[in-house]
Each structure stands twice: as C-alpha cells, then as structure tokens.
C-alpha cells in the first residue's frame, strides 16, 4: 500500500512539473527606485518596466509656450501637494513641445516624488490593473499617453473614458492621466457628422456622434492648445538650442540657414529648431 502511494505521489509531482512549464512566469519585481516606467504585458500579465535612461529636458529649455507651461506647472504643484487638480490633455500643432513638457516635469519635480508611467494606446484597457499596482505607493505618478488618437470602436477609447470619469471605483489620488494629441477631440471627424446637427431656434444642438467624440476630451479638466510658432518665435528657439550646443553668436548666414531648414520641412516648430541646432553644431564641430 505504501509503495502504491509513493508511486501516486511521484506521478502527481511529475504532472505538476509539466504544468508549471505551461504557466506564465510571475511578473518581474518592480524597481521602485526608477523615475520613469513603461507599462508592458508579458504572457497575459501587466508589469512596470523601469526606464534606465529617461529623456532629461528642463522646463526652462521649452520656449515660447509660457502660458501653457504656467498652467501645467501650477496643476502639477497641486498634484504633488495632494490638492485638487485635473487630468491633462495637450492638443495642437506638431513639434510644439507637448510631449517634452511632461518629460520636463519629471526632470524638474522628480525630487518631490513625481514619477512617470508611459502607457501605449493599446494597453489603456489595463488602467484598472495599473491603478491597483500604484494606488498605495507614496510617489505621485503621471500616467502618460503620447500622440493619442482613436478610431471608432477601439477598446482603449471606452477604457480611458471610464478611467477619467465614470468608474464605480474612486480614482487613485496619486495618479494623474496626461495625454498629448494632434487631434482636438482624439478621434477622426467626418463631414457627414455635421449633418446630424439640429437648429432649435437660436440654439445649436450637435448630433449624437459629435457629442460622443467631444465627451472624451471634456473629461480632461485641464485642456491646453498649442499653436504653430511664428518666425520670430522659431528663431528664438533656434538661438536657445544653438547656445545649448555652444554656438553663442547667430550670424545672418546661420539665421538664413535656419529659415531654409524650416522651409524644407514645412514647419516652424520647436522640434525643427532642435534638429537644426544639432545639425549646425555637428557640422561646425566637424569643421573645427
């Protein structure tokens, strides 16, 4: 009898060993000393992946967007002190510093406990799971979704709406959802949707489709718009980044090259100014 029991136990252990190979590996232990993270999925489980070398840029490096910067910094200070504050949506022209602003907030306020978690659009359905991971941590987390836009019926769209304002569970006090987009309402807009608009006397009532698209953007309490830079602002940013790379004097020739550089790219933006400064500094260093 004892022998049969030993055989049965051995067979059970063999079966369990085979099953263990099929089970997903446990998520890696979280390194809470990091400043920035990415939310990743592995074998059906979500986990926080530390970013070893976050992009370091300071708020002072972002020029000619002072009104937007002031409002965002004020909202962040409220968040860090546990005061009422709003989720943030930055929309508008490309290359104007929307994403860089959140990276600069991390650089300038990380010593006050600010952290950043980047979440891909496809992983927004994991927001409830991410909330439970972060809820009891002492740090303050910016949940960052870059270049956000949705097509119709994408699951992340509904998940984000619920996370912003609509879940039966309370939002975590140490989390702030922050997003950037080139689209004002985060979804494509079509001419046929305007045909749903009704005119009741002097009142304009948008159709249901338009209302649905607007409803997501309106759930962000702080909504800041960025506009294309004019020539003077663009050249100011060029001068700043040239000085950053050690070129203190902007000659008329260099100024003309900066304008031509922007013309070739069809945009006078902070990104183009940064690219021009890198190009000029590299060429000058090579000549020297």
Image (tube, rainbow, N blue to C red):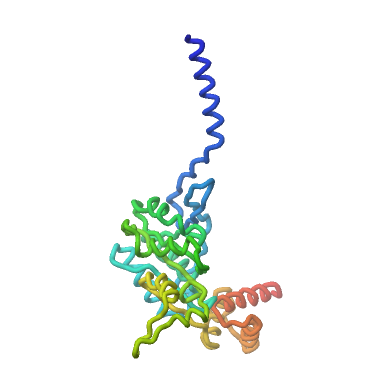
Pick whichever, 144 or 63, lies toward us.
144
Q: What residue appears at the point 60 percent right and 77 percent down from the top-left corner?
A: 277
Q: How many marks?
A: 0
Residue found farthest to the right:
287
- Residue 37 at x, y percent in the picture: 48, 56
Against 236, residue 20 (above or below) is above
Pick whichever, 151 or 186, lies toward us.
151
Q: Is residue 174 visible?
A: yes
- Residue 187 at x, y percent in the picture: 49, 72
Q: What residue appears at the point 53 percent right and 80 percent down from the top-left corner?
A: 237
Q: Quadrant of residue 105?
A: bottom left
Q: Is residue 111 visible?
A: no
Pick whichever, 13 or 37, lies toward us.
13
In the image: residue 163, left or right of residue 62: left
The image quadrant where one finds the C terminus is bottom right
- Residue 136 at x, y percent in the picture: 34, 51
- Residue 218 at x, y percent in the picture: 38, 73
Against 14, residue 196 (above or below) is below
Residue found farthest to the left:
83
Q: What residue appears at the point 38 percent right and 82 percent down from the top-left corner?
A: 205
């Amino acid at each position: 009898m004892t022998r049969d029991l030993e055989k049965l136990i051995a067979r059970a252990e063999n079966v369990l060993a085979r099953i263990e190979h099929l089970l997903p590996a446990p998520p890696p232990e979280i390194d809470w000393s990091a400043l920035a993270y990415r939310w990743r999925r592995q074998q059906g489980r979500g986990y926080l992946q530390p970013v070893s070398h976050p992009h370091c840029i300071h708020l002072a490096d972002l020029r000619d967007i002072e009104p937007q910067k002031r409002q965002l910094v004020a909202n962040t200070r409220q968040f860090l002190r546990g005061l009422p504050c709003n989720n943030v949506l930055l929309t508008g022209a490309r290359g104007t510093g929307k994403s860089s602003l959140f990276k600069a907030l991390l650089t300038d306020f990380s010593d006050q406990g600010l952290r950043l978690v980047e979440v891909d659009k496809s992983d927004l359905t994991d927001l409830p799971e991410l909330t439970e991971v972060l809820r009891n941590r002492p740090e303050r987390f910016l949940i960052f979704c870059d270049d956000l836009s949705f097509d119709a019926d994408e699951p992340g769209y509904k998940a984000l709406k619920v996370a912003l304002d609509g879940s039966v569970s309370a939002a975590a006090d140490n989390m702030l959802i922050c997003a950037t987009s080139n689209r004002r309402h985060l979804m494509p807009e079509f001419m046929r949707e305007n045909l749903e608009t009704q005119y009741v006397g002097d009142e304009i009532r948008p159709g249901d489709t338009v209302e649905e698209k607007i409803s997501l953007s309106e759930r962000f309490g702080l909504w800041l718009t960025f506009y294309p830079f004019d020539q003077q602002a663009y050249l100011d940013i060029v001068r700043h980044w040239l000085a950053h790379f050690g070129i203190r004097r902007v000659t008329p020739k260099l100024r003309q090259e900066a304008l031509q550089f922007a013309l070739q790219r069809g945009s006078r933006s902070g990104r183009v100014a940064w690219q021009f400064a890198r190009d000029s500094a590299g060429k000058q260093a090579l000549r020297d």
